């Protein structure tokens, strides 16, 4: 098999690393890839948002399978473009990608299908009307810009003044661009969050192992949101009862609802959940794998990913093939100084060779470039140090042993990834 992977972050490095282990895979291209992926795949320059250019690239390469990491190509209809040419691809259609592209579409879908989610107070297309709707609501209130906003579109407002400030910045000053043209207000849910990802060929589906990510920049969940500072996976995140409840009350109604509405969903579907006192509720959908969750997930895969995805693309996904390693895995993200604000770039990373000697640890690259023999930090999130172990504690100690060997000026990482492992509060447990 020749496989083309689209994207250039830690998620894509983790996928490339896993695909490379398959005896069926003879060639992997990654577009655009990064300084670490280069060691495992042929990296080709590409703009993941530019679907016509990606079509031209695939025309030239003729991959047996294309796997898409980020959301932009999906929203720009890469799934439709490839499938209409008969090219195998793991990517939902543009219509299906609305589940991520529009929070209003996703919320209205959840409501139509009677799937548990936070109560929506209303949808607004002017700041004036949104601000006047604030009176009489229970605080805190969650405000969500409708479109893709690079992780900046959700604000949990503690009071009317901060809510109004956010609404005006998004709608009057267009701080988030076109994604902020409309917004919704909704109830704030309380509980622990959980990432529940499935892969579906439109008929059958298979859940991946559950994960929890850490979005805030600082220990103790303080500071601004990021693209993810780490994640972990252990089966103890979910009791069998709760897992079944998520499948029965959320995953299956979602898939049935999509089919009933004429949406053929083929790809990964990420369900962001809040485990509330009255059961699991949907916070959001993503139409792709999450990062850093994917890094923790691949570390537990005990199956041939290329084989599973080839079956998927042929429309014959075989859920029983997805076998998982017992125990746990963890991914600790190392970020640049200043991230998630304006961050420093160009700093040389040391210690990567020492880490290679630690068994059970993989360092996936996100924002890096190779310059001669050196690896340079070029992004906000730079590396995902990923480890698997028999327990969450052993996975954590391996990952942090590796993190301690890596050095670059101003690097920052969280020291409490996985610290809450195993603590699940949800009815039905
Ligand atoms: P989303 O992109 O919709 O997942 O929102 C990003 C983050 O905002 C989530 O991971 C939650 O931490 C938080 N969030 C979103 N919606 C709610 C809600 N209704 N109640 C509480 N927190 C929320």
Image (cartoon, rainbow, N blue to C red):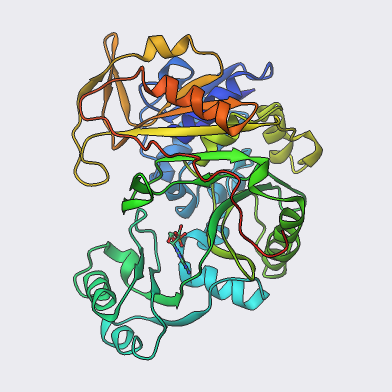
Name the residue at 55% across, 13% down. 359
Where residue 398 sits in the image (x, y, percent)? 50, 22
Of the four image quadrants, the one with ligand 1 is bottom left
Where residue 36 sits in the image (x, y, percent)? 40, 21
- State left or right for residue 258 relative to residue 8: right
Splitting the image into 4 quarters, where does residue 154 fall?
bottom left
The residue closer to the viewer here, 257 or 397, is 397
Name the residue at 32% across, 26% down. 368
Residue 345 seen in render: yes
Splitting the image into 4 quarters, where does residue 124 fall?
bottom left
The residue closer to the viewer here, 105 or 236, is 236
Whether residue 40 is situated above or below residue 389 in the rendered picture: above
Query: How many discs mark residues in the rendered view?
Result: 0
Residue 60 seen in render: no
Quarter of the picture holding the C terminus: bottom right
The residue closer to the viewer here, 131 or 55, is 131
Name the residue at 35% across, 88% down. 133
The residue closer to the viewer here, 158 or 209, is 158
Whether residue 50 is situated above or below residue 348 in the rendered picture: below
Where residue 427 sits in the image (x, y, percent)? 68, 65
Whether residue 90 is situated above or below residue 399 in the rendered picture: below
Name the residue at 39% across, 24% down. 403
Quarter of the picture holding the N terminus: top right
Whether residue 338 is situated above or below residue 271 in the rendered picture: above
Where residue 196 sits in the image (x, y, percent)? 61, 51
- State left or right for residue 274 relative to residue 128: right
């Amino acid at each position: 098999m020749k496989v083309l992977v689209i994207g250039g972050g830690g998620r894509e490095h983790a996928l490339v690393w896993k695909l490379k282990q398959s005896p069926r895979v003879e060639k992997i291209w990654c577009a655009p890839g990064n300084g670490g992926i280069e060691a495992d795949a042929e990296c080709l320059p590409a703009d993941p948002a530019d679907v016509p250019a990606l079509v031209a690239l695939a025309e030239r390469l003729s991959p047996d399978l294309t796997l898409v990491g980020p959301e932009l190509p999906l929203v720009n209809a890469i799934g439709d473009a490839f499938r209409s040419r008969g090219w195998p691809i793991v990517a939902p259609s543009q219509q299906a990608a609305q589940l991520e592209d529009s929070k209003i579409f996703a919320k209205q879908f959840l409501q139509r299908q009677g799937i548990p989610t936070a109560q929506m107070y209303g949808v607004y297309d002017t700041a004036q009307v949104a601000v006047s709707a604030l009176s009489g609501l229970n605080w805190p209130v969650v405000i969500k810009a409708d479109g893709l906003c690079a992780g900046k579109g959700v604000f949990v407002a503690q009071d009317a003044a901060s809510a109004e400030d956010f609404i005006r910045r998004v709608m009057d000053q267009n701080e988030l661009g076109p994604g902020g043209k409309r917004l919704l207000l909704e109830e704030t849910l309380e509980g622990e969050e959980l990432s529940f990802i499935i892969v579906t060929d439109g008929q059958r589906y298979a859940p991946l192992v559950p994960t929890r990510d850490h979005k805030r920049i600082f220990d103790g969940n303080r500071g601004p949101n990021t693209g993810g500072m780490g994640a972990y996976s252990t089966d103890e995140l979910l009791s069998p009862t709760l897992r079944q409840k998520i499948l029965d009350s959320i995953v299956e109604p979602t898939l049935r609802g999509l089919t009933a509405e004429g949406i053929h969903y083929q790809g990964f579907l990420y369900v962001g959940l809040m485990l509330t006192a009255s059961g699991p509720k949907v916070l959001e959908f993503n139409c792709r794998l999450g990062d850093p969750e994917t890094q923790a997930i691949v570390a537990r895969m005990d199956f041939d990913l290329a084989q599973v995805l080839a079956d998927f693309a042929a429309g014959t996904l075989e859920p029983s093939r997805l076998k998982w390693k017992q125990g746990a895995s963890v991914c600790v993200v190392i970020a640049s100084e200043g991230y998630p604000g304006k961050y420093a770039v160009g700093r040389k990373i040391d210690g990567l060779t020492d880490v290679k000697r630690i068994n059970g640890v993989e360092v996936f690259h996100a924002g890096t470039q190779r310059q001669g023999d050196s690896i340079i930090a070029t992004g906000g999130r730079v590396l995902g140090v990923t480890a698997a172990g028999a327990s969450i504690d052993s996975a954590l100690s391996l990952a942090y042993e590796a993190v301690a060997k890596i050095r670059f000026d101003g690097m920052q990482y969280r020291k409490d990834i996985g610290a809450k492992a195993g603590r699940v509060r949800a009815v039905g447990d």
